[in-house]
Amino acid sequence: MFKTLLTTTAAKANLMDGMRAASASALMLLVGCMLHVPDFSWAAIGAFWTSLATAPHGSRSRLASMLSFTMLSTLGGLLTTYAAGFGATAGALTILGFVTMAGLTRIWGDAPYQVAILAATACVVMVDHPTAGGAGGYAYLGLYLLGCLFATTLSMAIWQLRPAAPERHNNHWHQAASHSVRTALQQLRAHASLSSDGVHFALRLGIATTAAYLAVHKLELPCGYWATMAVLLILQPSAAGTLPRSLERAVGTVIGTLIAVAIGALAQTPLEIALAVFPLIGLTMALRPVGYSVFVAFLTPSFVLVADYAMPAIEYNYALARLENNLLGSAIAVAATLTLWPLMDRLRK
């Protein structure tokens, strides 16, 4: 059985994706070490998330997805962080609007939704991260944008993936683009109703994420963005999708938290953290196709180490706070799925 598991894992793993994402993120941290600028952790986060947003096929699709994510997450992060400066209520309203629109992109398929939901994830992290809007103002957004563009350049110009598969370019690209826009508008009109499952899912996602944001602010929980992230990444259109996803995330988060604590005890300097991040992010991306719980198990310590790059000591209490926030977000996602326009076993896009 163990041999079969290893064989299946090896067959599904994508080592090239892992190496590219790890290189982009780790290099940003190493530059931060050389320049003695801890806020380069934002560049590493941008590079990592841009790698996650990459479309699986075709250089044009990859470029479009990476640049779309870069634009949406940077502008969305600026808007939500600015709004949150006026108080939690303003921040909550901005998050509600942005996340609801991100949820609506699910009507156009998995690829647009992946880009939009990752951009929304970036926004809820930026708006609640301790360094956001601090003494450095919005300078962290410039570093974040740098990381996004570096990952895009690494993928498109320096380290091409799947170069052996030639693409068929449509000479009448303007006609293809026009057809895609018309199709997208037709789908949007088809869901332009409060009785639409697509609208219900978007509203459910926006309301649940906003509830998590307000809950962590009301309770004054540290690392509150882990709760909002959990809602965004767990909530599915039906209970049949959300319930197992929440369980997988809980298991993966527990394992990942233990890994983060263990590495945090060994990696005490920014350079040591940068070196530790490389294999972790590599495994996160490479094992992403294997299963969600495996993905989360490596995603958790990767993001913890990168996000806390400016504060290298990963203490037990901080790790426990992240775990608690993940469980809170999971509970909110499950509750929203069961109470807000529940689909139960009917799966929808």
Image (spheres, rainbow, N blue to C red):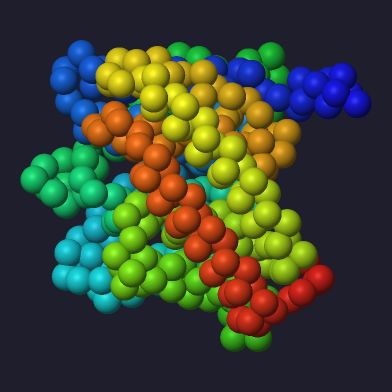
Q: Position of residue 11 (x, y in %)?
A: 79, 22
On screen, residue 200 above or below 305: below
Q: Position of residue 185 (x, y in %)?
A: 58, 67
Q: Nearer the viewer, residue 268 or 348?
A: 268
Relative to 347, 131 lies left or right: left
Q: Position of residue 307 (x, y in %)?
A: 34, 37
Q: Nearer the viewer, residue 282 or 223?
A: 223
Q: Quadrant of the N terminus?
A: top right
Task: Find residue 153 and report its image quarter.
Answer: top left
Q: Quadrant of the C terminus?
A: bottom right
Q: Position of residue 81 (x, y in %)?
A: 24, 58
- Residue occupying image coordinates x 46% and y 32%: 260
- Residue occupying image coordinates x 40% and y 40%: 316
Q: Nearer the viewer, residue 216 or 101?
A: 216
Relative to 214, 51 lies left or right: right
Relative to 260, 204 lies left or right: right
Task: Find residue 215 and report its image quarter.
Answer: bottom left
- Residue occupying image coordinates x 29% and y 29%: 312
On screen, residue 294 above or below 190: above
Q: How many marks?
A: 0
- Asked whether residue 130 is in view, the answer is yes
Judged from this view, the residue extending furthest toward the front is: 316
- Residue occupying image coordinates x 71% and y 24%: 13
- Asked whether residue 175 is in view, the answer is no
On screen, residue 125 above or below 297: below
